[in-house]
Amino acid sequence: MDHWGYNMMPYSIFGFIFQIVGLVFLVLAILFVARYLMKNRKLRFWDNSMEILKERYAKGEIDKKEFEEKKKDLL
């Protein structure tokens, strides 16, 4: 019998387990960062309603009272 195959088996099993644990850790880290950024509204790149509201206020289309009301609604 070849003793190399017998001795290498535990290492391959531990390597496989460590790869699975590392992959799970990586996925959880990505989800944690995404959730943190979404919670702090830093990842809402598709939502430009606040920029539009600021532009309308800067152009004079809406007054300060209306700007504050709409800002409160958005946040």
Image: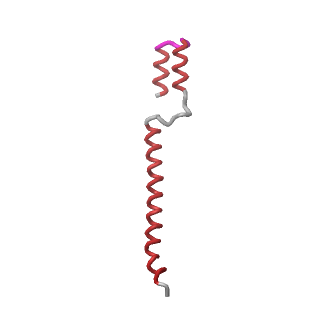
> Would you place residue 65 above or below residue 45 in this image?
above
Q: Residue at x 52, y 15 (%)?
A: 58
Toward which corner of the image does residue 18 lie, by quadrant? bottom left
* Magenta stretch secondary structure, dominant: loop
Is residue 61 magenta-colored? Answer: yes
- Give the image location of residue 12, x and y in percent: 47, 71
Residue 66 in percent (x, y) is at 49, 16
Relative to 61, 64 lies left or right: left
Residue shown at the point (47%, 48%) measured from the top left: 30
Residue 8, given in percent of the width and then of the height, sits at 46, 76
Vertical placement of 15 versus 8: above or below? above
**75 sits to left or right of 61:** left
**Would you say residue 6 sits in the magenta stretch?**
no
Residue name at image x 51 percent, y 20 percent: 54
Give the answer, above or below, for where 69 lies relative to 17: above
Residue at x 47% of width, y 39% of height: 38
Residue range corresponding to the magenta coloring = 60-64
Counting the numbered discs, the total is 0
